[in-house]
Amino acid sequence: MSTTHPEQVIRVLLADDHPVVRDGCRNLLESTPDIRVVAEVGDSSSLFVAYADFSPDVVVLDMNMPEVGGIEVIHGLLRRDAEARILVFSMYDSDVMIQRALEAGALGYLIKHSQMSQMLLAVREIASGRPYIDASKVMNIAAAGLKQETGPLDCLTAREYQVFTLLAEGKTVLQIAEILSISPKTAGVHHANIMNKLELTNGAQLVRLAVRLGIVVDV
C-alpha cells in the first residue's frame, strides 16, 4: 500500500456518462486531502480534450463511454501519452473483460459494485505506478495471468465484445444502441458480425457461450 502525503495531491480525471456515478466518485475522492478531481467528462471526445488540458495523474474510466468504447479509449490515451495511468471503473465483472482492459494498457480495474473504499486505495496505488485489481477478482486474474491463450472471442473487436456482453445479458439491439450511444442500424451490424464470426445461429447459443466463458451467470 502506497504512502501519499497530503502535499502530494493526486489529480484525477473522472470519465463516466452517468452524472450520478461521477458525483459519488468525486465526493468520495475529495473526502481525503490527498486526492482532487480536476475534471469530469461524460463522453470520449471530452475525455481526450480534458486529458490534454489537465494532465491528470489518474484517469478513472468507465468502459461504456459514448462514441468510443473503453478499450479504444485506453488505446487512444496511451497513444497520446505512453505514461497515462488508467483505472477502469466498470459494471462488467467478467475475467475476460478485466484481462482485455489490462492487456490494452489500463493499470487497474475496479468493479462498480465493490466497496467504495477500494476506490481510494486503487487511485493511490495507480498514481504511484502500481497496478490494482478489484479485490474480488485478483486471485482469478493472477491464476490466469494477464495473457490468455487464443479464445473464441478473440476474433471480436472491442466494440463487438461490448455488444456480445450486452446481448448475453438479455439486452435487445435497440437497448444496446441506446446504452452505447450508437444507431440501431450500427448495433444491428455489430450483432450480425458477432453471429457470423462466432458461427452462432440464435440468441440461445450466444447466451450458452457467454455462460461457458464466465461472462454471464446461468440463472
Image (cartoon, grey):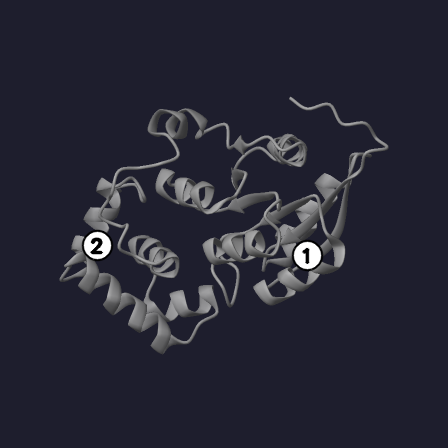
Along the line of sight, the residue nearer the viewer: 93 or 170: 93
Q: Position of residue 112 (x, y in %)?
A: 53, 42
Say above or below: 17 vs 23: below
Along the line of sight, the residue nearer the viewer: 188 or 158: 158
Q: Amino acid at mark 2?
A: Leu
Say above or below: 199 vs 209: below
For marks 2 and 1, give the one nearer the viewer: 1
Image quadrant occupied by the N terminus: top right
- The residue that disc 2 covers is 206
Q: Amino acid at mark 1?
A: Tyr
- The residue that disc 1 covers is 51
Q: Are marks 2 and 1 in contact (CB under 8 Å)?
A: no
Q: Position of residue 2 (x, y in %)?
A: 68, 24
Locate residue 76: give its quadrant. Answer: bottom right
**Residue, x 45% and y 47% (percent of image)?**
104
Label 1 neighbour load within 10 Å: few <14, some 14-19, many 20+: many
Q: Position of residue 130 (x, y in %)?
A: 59, 30
Task: Tell which circle, 2 or 1, labels the residue nearer the N-terminal end.
Answer: 1
Along the line of sight, the residue nearer the viewer: 52 or 5: 52
